[in-house]
Amino acid sequence: MQLSFPIAPFQARGPLSSQLLTALSLPANDSGSSLGGFIVATAEALARCTDIVNDDDLQLTLFLLYGLHYGGAVESDAAWEWHPTTIVARVAIEQALETSLRASVSQPPVPAPTQDAVARALFTLTIDDQGPSLSRYLARKATEEQVVEFIVHRSIYTLKEADPHSWAIPRLAGRAKAALIEIQADEYGGGRPDRMHSRLFADTMRGLGLDTRYAGYVDQVPALVLCSFNMMSLFGLNRRLRGAIVGHLAAFEMTSAIPSRLYGDGFRRLGFSETITRYFDEHIEADAVHEQIAGRDLAGALAEDDPLTLPDIMFGAAACLAMDGWVADHLLASWQAGRSSLRSPLPEPAGRSLAGSAMAS
């Protein structure tokens, strides 16, 4: 009896993602009919593409291909994870994405390969970043509908926090590995499942009446948000880019504590309860500690022990800041123009009865 899998509840965004979604509903050994010509179709889609960061079809396809490694994004035959066709297509798309990112993200100056110099350079890079202040907008002006949209966008990564960076653990050694494990242990709740940051974020979503299943809002978010997560997966899953994922994490931690306080303030301004703000409140103190570990003990130690990774450490940090800025630009431009930042309205009961959610728990 041939097994079959339910077609993922995602809407295809073009011919490539449509073919992949259909294939993933079938056993991997049926790939001759389900993914025939997929590699050629991938090459043709890349040839037509003019902006891969915002290409809906390619970003959804890459998100699904990476999802085979994470689990939870789509129910499928486990054999698809390492099927030659999916791997070849994934590599082709991620190579094009990396090329695009390196062309559009300015490479910061490369400091001396010492712990102190690298930490100083990373702190300078993040302090000098003049991207749009999404956190200040949420703290002072955002409506209930807008803060819900913000959470929906964040769910694509945060329900998997901090899995993309954990791919780097076996790719590092010595001091850098120890520092990364110290950070990740906190992210995963220090051995307490209820304190895992992904679980705290799910509590926030639940308090807002949102679906807490992973990837439940893929259809609603634009390609750019999928790309933000795909970029982390690109850096984390490729050993040659271990410097980039370390730099990304360093910048991520260095730019989290103050925005987290402002995000929490925004939810409190709107009357939401501590259950909903707990995730952000947790990050005020945690990330103030993590940024020191990430800058010196992780990124700095890696640069000292393996100086060849230093350019990518700085590139990964700059790419993190650039991507966050692009996503913030999209959200703020949409809201300031009086429109939703989502591709389509949230399905019921998501986001309904927000006032009731604010008083609950």
Image (tube, rainbow, N blue to C red):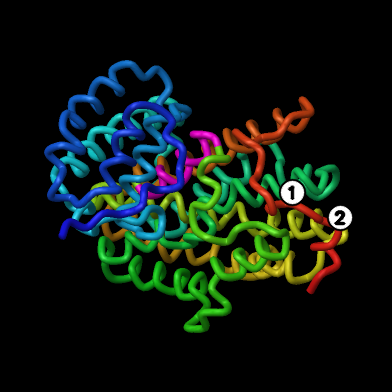
Horizontal side of 39 relative to 94 (left or right) equals: left
Residue 225 lies within the magenta run: yes
Q: How far across and down, in percent of the image, does residue 206 sit?
A: 66, 64
Q: Which mark is residue 147?
A: 1
- Res 251 seen here: no
Q: Quadrant of the C terminus?
A: bottom right
Residue 59 image offset from top left, x and y in percent: 40, 35
Mark 2: which amino acid? Leu
Identify the residue under disc 2: 270
Q: Is residue 20 magenta?
A: no
What residue is drawn where x is 72% and y is 47%? 135
Q: Which residues are magenta?
A: 222-233
- Foreground: 6 or 356? 6
Cα distance, mark 1 to mark 2?
9 Å
First reached walking from the N terminus: tag 1 or tag 2? 1
Specify whether 53 is left or right of 140: left
* Disc number placed over residue 14 in the picture, else none: none
Q: Main secondary structure of the magenta part?
A: helix
Q: Residues within 10 Å of mark 2 (few under 14, many from 20)?
A: some
Residue 111's quadrant in the figure? top left
Residue type at mark 1 is Val
Instruction: Name the side, left or right, on which 243 lies relative to 227.
Output: left
